[in-house]
């Protein structure tokens, strides 16, 4: 099989297209988070990080990634903004280009997940123009030179499908981590898997309304309550684009032993633009 090369869709728009400028911006955003942090970096199980243009959400993403030890293997879950491709789509044999270089997909872990959860399908169409995984990569590359990813686009709100994917993800991660630890127990930290849910929060309502809605959703994430998040998003009409990926992440994280979640930063686009009449919310959350 020939490795598919996924070229950048939003370089030069959502984030700088030149490597030097991009790396400088990422370091500024993460350094600000490190300055505010009270503790050192942690080997988390999961996180929620935003995916807007860096000028708007970079400080929130930086606050998240400044808290984390980035392992060599990350599963990145994102919503489907383009409407293209399969409803649950992974690229198992691919290389993702950014201005900072290429990131390889973990073909073996992706293949295991496909076997374990047949509703997930191999599909590049859902990924081609989708920005929500791409914008996470420079933050990860800046900290982990040996990065490999399992990129998954989620285009369904069906709770059973989301829960099923989360359960399958937990199973394959647990199996892989156990095998890795048996091979080299001294390298356990490097062998961990981080599950990233790429999501912005409520969209295009006033700052006041958005903050109220977002904190209802955030409350459920902090409680590690995937079903509760799904319910409150639908009941309260919260336009959190990545609630599906977050439900999957929370489901898997709990099965992998997660016991707590921390909101490290919240902001809205109004904090940057000064326009509080119509904003997008951004939450950075770490799950341990």
Image: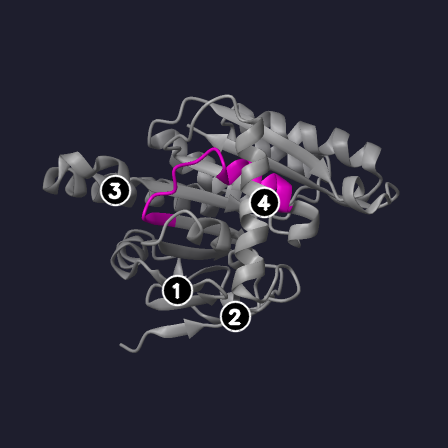
Mark closer to the chain start, 1 or 3: 1
Which residue lies under the disc numbered 1?
Answer: 91
Q: Answer yes or no: do the residues labelled 4 and 1 have beta carbons within 8 Å?
A: no
Q: CA distance from mark 3 to mark 4?
A: 28 Å
Q: Answer yes or no: do the residues labelled 3 and 4 have beta carbons within 8 Å?
A: no
**Could you say whether the residue bearing mark 4 is in a helix, strand or loop?**
helix
x, y (%) of residue 3? Answer: 32, 74
The answer to whether residue 99 is visible is: yes
Which residue lies under the disc numbered 4?
Answer: 28
Q: CA distance from mark 3 to mark 2?
A: 29 Å
Q: CA distance from mark 1 to mark 2?
A: 10 Å
Can you tell which of label 4 and label 2 is closer to the viewer? 4
Q: CA distance from mark 4 to mark 2?
A: 29 Å
Q: 53 or 177, which is in the foreground?
A: 53
Q: Answer yes or no: do the residues labelled 3 and 2 have beta carbons within 8 Å?
A: no
Which residue lies under the disc numbered 2?
Answer: 128
For the residue carrying disc 1, how many other residues have a C-alpha within 10 Å: few (<14), some (14-19), or many (20+)?
A: many
The answer to whether residue 227 is visible is: no
x, y (%) of residue 81? Answer: 62, 60
Which residue lies under the disc numbered 3?
Answer: 191
Please provide the residue range marked out in magenta. Answer: 58-74
For the residue carrying disc 2, how many other residues have a C-alpha within 10 Å: few (<14), some (14-19), or many (20+)?
A: some
| Left or right, 9 with reference to 165 | right
For the residue carrying disc 3, how many other residues have a C-alpha within 10 Å: few (<14), some (14-19), or many (20+)?
A: some
The residue positioned 82% from the left and 37% from the top of the image is: 207
């Amino acid at each position: 099989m020939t490795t598919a090369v996924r070229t950048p869709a939003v370089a030069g728009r959502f984030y700088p297209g030149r490597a030097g400028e991009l790396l400088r911006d990422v370091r500024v955003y993460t350094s600000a988070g490190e300055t505010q942090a009270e503790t050192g970096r942690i080997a988390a199980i999961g996180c929620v990080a935003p995916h807007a243009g860096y000028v708007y959400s970079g400080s929130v993403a930086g606050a998240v990634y400044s808290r984390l030890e980035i392992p060599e293997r990350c599963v990145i879950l994102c919503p489907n903004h383009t409407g293209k491709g399969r409803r649950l789509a992974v690229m198992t044999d691919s290389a993702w280009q950014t201005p900072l270089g290429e990131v390889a997909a973990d073909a073996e872990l992706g293949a295991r997940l496909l076997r374990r959860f047949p509703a997930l399908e191999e599909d590049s169409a859902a990924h081609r123009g989708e920005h929500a995984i791409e914008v996470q990569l420079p933050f990860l590359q800046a900290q982990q030179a040996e990065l490999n990813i399992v990129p998954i686009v989620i285009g369904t709100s069906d709770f059973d499908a989301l829960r099923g994917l989360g359960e399958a993800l937990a199973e394959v991660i647990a199996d892989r981590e156990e095998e890795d630890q048996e091979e080299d127990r001294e390298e356990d930290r490097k062998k961990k898997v981080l599950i990233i849910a790429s999501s912005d929060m409520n969209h295009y309502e006033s700052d006041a309304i958005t903050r109220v809605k977002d904190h209802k959703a955030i409350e459920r994430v902090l409680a590690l309550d995937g079903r509760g998040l799904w319910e409150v998003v639908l009941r309260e009409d919260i336009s959190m684009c990545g609630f599906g990926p977050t439900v999957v992440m929370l489901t898997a994280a709990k099965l992998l032993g997660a016991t707590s979640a921390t909101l490290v930063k919240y902001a809205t686009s109004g904090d940057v633009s000064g326009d509080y009449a119509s904003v997008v919310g951004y939450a950075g959350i770490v799950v341990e």
